[in-house]
Image: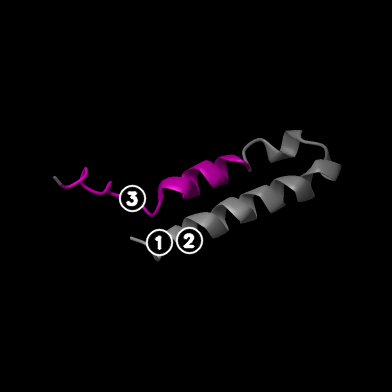
Amino acid sequence: MPGPPPQQVDPRAGIDEAMAGLENLDQVPLAEHVERFDAVHSQLTAALSAIDRV
């Protein structure tokens, strides 16, 4: 008996979530901007890497 069908992966799924990390950046202390940018960069890298598996 075969397993469940593979789930469709939307290659854009993580992009919107990553970009949400930049919302209200103007209200965050400047010292925290680098941390935010690093987190968004990591999420975008993961999302783009997932496209290869689509």
Question: Real-space Cα distance between discs 1 and 3?
Answer: 9 Å
Compared to 1, does 51 lie above or below? below
Report the side of 47 relative to 36 (left or right). Answer: left
Helix, strand or loop for disc 1: helix
Q: Residue at x 67, y 48 (%)?
A: 39
Question: Real-space Cα distance between discs 3 and 2?
Answer: 12 Å
Q: Which residue is mark 2?
A: 48
Label 3 Cα crowd, 10 Å radius (few <14 / some 14-19 / many 20+)? few
Q: Amino acid at mark 2?
A: Leu
Q: Amino acid at mark 1?
A: Ile
Q: Which residue is mark 3?
A: 9
Residue found at the very far bottom of the displayed protein: 52
CB-based contact (under 8 Å), mark 2 and mark 1: yes
Helix, strand or loop for disc 3: loop
Start-end of magenta stretch: 2-21
Helix, strand or loop for disc 2: helix
Q: Which residue is mark 1?
A: 51
**Could you say where residue 26 lies in the image, as x and y percent from the top left?**
73, 39
Q: Residue at x 20, y 46 (%)?
A: 5
30 or 50, nearer to the observer: 50
